[in-house]
Amino acid sequence: MTLHPMISALRRHKAGVVLIALQIALTLAIVCNAVFIIGQRIERVNRPTGLDENNLFLISQQWVGAPSGDDPASVDKLDSLQQADLAALRALPDVASVTPINSLPLLNSSWNGSVSLQPGKDLRAGNARTTFYFSDEQVLSTLGLHLVAGRAFTAADVQHQAMRDQREPSIVILTKALADKLFPKGDALGKVVYFNGDPAPTTIIGLVERMQVPAVGSWTSSFTWYATLAPTRLNANFSRYAIRAKPGRLDAAMHAVTPTLYATNRMRVLDDDSIKSFAQIRADAYRADVGMAILMGVVCLILLAVTAAGIVGLTSFWVGQRHRQIGVRRALGARKIDILHYFQIENLVIASVGAVIGLLLAIGLNLLLMHRFEMDRLPVAYVLAGIVAVLALGQGAVFVPARRASNVPPVVATRAA
Amino acid sequence: MFNYYLELALRSLKRSPGLTLLMVLAIGFGVAASMTTWSVFRAVSGDPIPWKSSKLFVPQIDMWGPKGRGPNSTDNEPPDAMDYTDAMALMRAHRGKLQSAMYQISPSVVPADASKHPINVSGHAVYSEFFPMLDVPFLYGNGWSADDDSQRAAVAVISGKLNDKLFGGVNSVGRTVSIEGKDYRVVGVLGSWNPQPRFYDVVNTGGFSTGVEDVFVPFERAIAMGMPNDGNTNCSEIPAQSGFVGLQQSSCIWIAYMVQLDDAAAVSAYRSWLDGYAKDQQTAGRFGWAPNNRLRDVPAFLDHEQVVPSDTKVSLLVALGLLIVCLVNTAGLLLAKFLRRSSEIGVRRALGAPRGAIYAQFLTEAGMIGLAGGVLGLLLTGVGVASVSWVLPKDIASLARLDFSLLALTLLVAVVATTLAGLYPTFRASRVQPAWQLKSN
């Protein structure tokens, strides 16, 4: 079949053709970018934190009328309060292990600084940015972190200091990502680094496979996997405890901690937000991303449905309009399949023009989003998949009216219009 | 005549119910998606204090210099909060009509009823001028005085919510509340006040908050009591001294500042005073760089801090794209529908109907589709706004509301947009040659 008669037929109703092509182009542009956003968000939400998240929960609590922690006596007082809590929690039957910690991955509270290979460097000019997790010797087992080199902290390593004390730890465990960034040759173990421009050296004694930083905002994207673990209990008027419940005993352990902590010391704040399972922390952290993905998904579905329905509607109209001409062609010997193909190829031509325009629009929209909203570059695969999808959508939508057209009997040619 | 067109339109729409339904659905979904995202955008981009926002300013001083911005910084923006030294210097100079330094606190409050457990509240340490400057509404009592500021008086303003919890909602002015284990005299109870975004302290609150501000205490009292700051602390270098006192002596930023300046003369006077201050610091050797200050009003500062989440803007953009596709779709279908009736148009034109009458007839039909789409859009917008609460983050979702103006806008957008989409099809319909149509039949 030659395209010539089809093209000249399309010229007869330019406006309708232009509108459908435009609709397909806009649909392609928006769907490509929306699906790309969905893909990025799903990838973000699914990345593992490095923790064994099952059976893990967190307590955040505050002591009432506790000392400031600015002088040695009050630091010791705060530490004894914390030690009492730890002992009480570790004695619970449903609890496997407990560690004090200043924050957890995905929790919106972080302590960040710089790490450098040279002492006395300016704070903002370190070799890498890192987040600090201050904890004790039970941190690896409680969080389920994988030690890939070196050793874990022992009880003898653990120090305690006031939250606003500027001393840096003498030994640390780093994530492998951070160690590789600082020592690209992979020989970080046993090496010395300097934190926050401090002149005192810190020795790397171990490496964990993976551990995410707390905050999930875009400002952390340059150091998402650069975490530093310090064997230090931080003393302040508040504390956080990460707790691993025995398998299957998460609910029981979560219910048991409130009365236990009040029994240890009544003068504290423990409210609804104080005890959170890690699943809850995860859900809260990624709520915006999941919401955005759902929203984009709904918009895509509506778009594709509207465009498909539009093609069905307009093609149906054209079939009705050309009822008699179809009859003439059939009377002149065209087979049913020829009529079906005619409408299918017509749609393919229009959709292809729309797809080419849509390709340009998709890239344009992506550039706008990159420029204004820190989006990443749209991979070509998404656009190609989008083109295939809209072409398939067009063919699917055109099938029903095209088949109706192919069923027009040749006898129509003899009737008056 | 309009009634006649309505009747014609209804008859025409009934003749092809499938096509009509298709158009109504497209308009309904398109409008609803746009309006739902608009309701969220409107909620987060609104002016929290429209009657006064152009008179409230956030001064920024460059106490870090170019080095403090780090090697990757490309702009020359000074830090967006203040260190203690500069905040206190600005308070002492007292150059604005009203002003307050403030920092976020999160103290514990012990109920008088010993059987109840202590609770944690959030709030701010502020100066007395905070309350008149921001037009904070009081249910009982008032803010404290300038004397209370300087004498570091143990006074507090509490929220209506905390007042309900602690005092059963009665007038508690003059009674005692235990904050961080110390007694404070209640001088005022706030009425309903929960501005979003928290324009007076964007840096520490991130803009939006699900909670309510429960306590306000005098700034210098909080400092004297060592009430630690809750929120962000940003340092360009590690403080020389440990502890909260060390923080006060450092160049770390953790204090928000707001000043009221009533007219352009006051603004420029304040600006030149700021520059003079920075120059003095340079002369004194504290700043090794030229003055680099900013003085933005509230809307400009909210924009600078990018308070509106980019997700909200992208959603609105994508939803508007969806609406445009729905309109293009409707235009195509209307075109098909109108031109199918060429013979009818031919007859009407031959019988003497002017082009204007054709316009009126077909635009009425388009408008009716728009209205029907708008009504469907209203329902779907209702569903949409209700479902954002389980899709979006709580602090933002709670702000999106269905109100009369949103409903009216939904209908208006549906009708106007559909009529616009009907313009070209109607133009084509009005161009139908009556003679040709009559002849061919």
Image: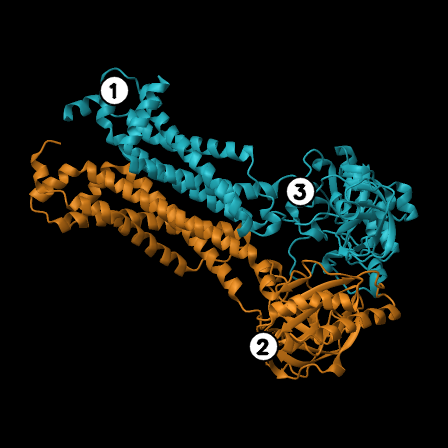
Kindly identify which residue carries mark 2.
A209
Q: Position of residue A153 (x, y in %)?
A: 70, 81
Q: Position of residue B79 (x, y in %)?
A: 72, 53
Measured along the vertical axis of the image, is residue B287 above or below residue B8?
A: below
**Is disc 3 placed on a helix, strand or loop?**
helix
Q: Return the chain for callout 1.
A: B
Kindly identify which residue carries mark 1.
B348
Query: Do circles 3 and 1 both sit on a common chain?
Result: yes
> How many dots with numbers?
3
Q: Amino acid at mark 2?
A: Glu
Q: Return the chain for callout 3.
A: B
In the rendered image, is residue A385 in sight?
A: yes
Please state if A387 lies on the left or on the right of B341 as rendered: right
Kindly identify which residue carries mark 3.
B300
Q: Amino acid at mark 1?
A: Arg
**In the figure, what tint was chain A given?**
orange
**In the figure, what tint was chain B given?**
cyan
Please state if A336 lies on the left or on the right of A106 as rendered: left
Query: In terms of image quadrants, where is residue A331?
Result: top left
Measured along the vertical axis of the image, is residue B403 above or below residue A384?
A: above
Q: Return the chain for callout 2.
A: A
Q: CA distance from mark 2 to mark 1?
A: 80 Å
